[in-house]
Amino acid sequence: MKKVLLTLTLLGVAANVYAADLLDTVQQRGTLKIALEGTYPPFNFKDKDQKLTGFEVELGAALAQKLKLKPEFITGEWSGLLAGLQGGKFDVVLNQVSITDKRKEVFDFSQPYTISSAQLIVRKNEKRSFKSLADLAGKKMGVTQGSNYAEMVKAQGGIESKFYPSAPEIFQDLATGRIDAGINDSLLIPFAIKEAKLPLKAGAAVGSATQMGIPFAKGNPKFKVALDGALNALHKDGSFKKISVKWFGIDVSKAPGAR
């Protein structure tokens, strides 16, 4: 009988550990593990001194502070970030992740923190008129591996996709003529082109506005409440707007027509 009771007790302990909310885990650890690319300016990148900086780096630090945690940033290629999150390597991904039905099957998300749209990138001296993805039929398009932009191009059909680990590599190949156009986040493009110092320009916006959120493992309701509460607190005290205006000149949490 004692063995049965001991077994049941151990099973109960194991179940409680398994059912622990992510909020309990991060509070016990004292840190929030935040994954991002580190090559996605102005959202997250390394400055001339190789220090991690950008909008999402500052936002991540501010969120961690509201949660009374220390931020621990982990960098990696975009194609591996969501897989790493699913594998439990970090707590959240803060890397302009669009909230899609497909991703919601695997992850839960915070409330949206930015709203943007896809936009084409072309050479500064481009004479051809690319007003939509349809205009790029038969052409070569640079896309980030595993991104929703890659899915958009694939769904359009007729475009040859060339895959890259991050935006800077797309810009380099576009400038040298290896591809005809690129596609990325409309909020990223002006800053990234300026930083890259390449003969490129923003092209036409394509698709509709998309909401971006912070994904984390499913089944953590307390963590979601705390994370959304931290975001709301940053909006309420003006911190979010201050960080946003610093990097973009606008409040990126508002829809383009409301900015």
Image (cartoon, grey):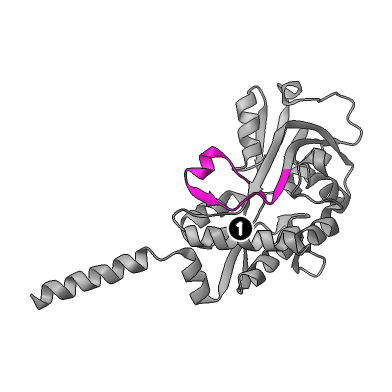
Given the current orientation, which residue lies at the most extreme right position?
Answer: 125
Quarter assignment of residue 199: top right
- Please give the name of the residue rendered at 46% of the width and 57% of the height, measured from the top-left corner: 87
Residue 120 drawn at (x, y percent): 78, 35
Give the quadrant of the N terminus.
bottom left
Tag count = 1
Residue 256 against residue 18 in the figure, above or below: above
Is residue 243 something that shows in the picture? yes
Mark 1 is surrounded, within 10 Å at the Cα level, by few (under 14), some (14 to 19) or many (20 or more) other residues, namely some
* Residue 173 at x, y percent in the picture: 77, 41
Relative to residue 4, is residue 51 drawn left or right?
right
For numbered disc 1, what is the local secondary structure?
helix
Q: Is residue 97 visible?
A: no
Residue 212, horizontal then vertical, whole percent = 66, 47
Give the quarter of the figure containing the C terminus. top right
Q: Residue at x 65, y 69 (%)?
A: 66
| The residue positioned farthest toward the left in the image shown | 1
Q: Is residue 39 magenta?
A: no
Q: Which residues are magenta?
A: 96-115
**Location of mark 1 (residue):** 228
* Residue at the (62%, 54%) spot, across then down: 77
x%, y% of residue 82?
Answer: 54, 51
* Residue type of the residue flagged with mark 1: Asp
Q: Is residue 17 left or right of residue 91?
A: left
Could you say which quadrant of the image residue 228 lies in? Answer: bottom right
Q: Height in image: 119 above or below 231?
A: above
Above/below status of 51 relative to 170: below
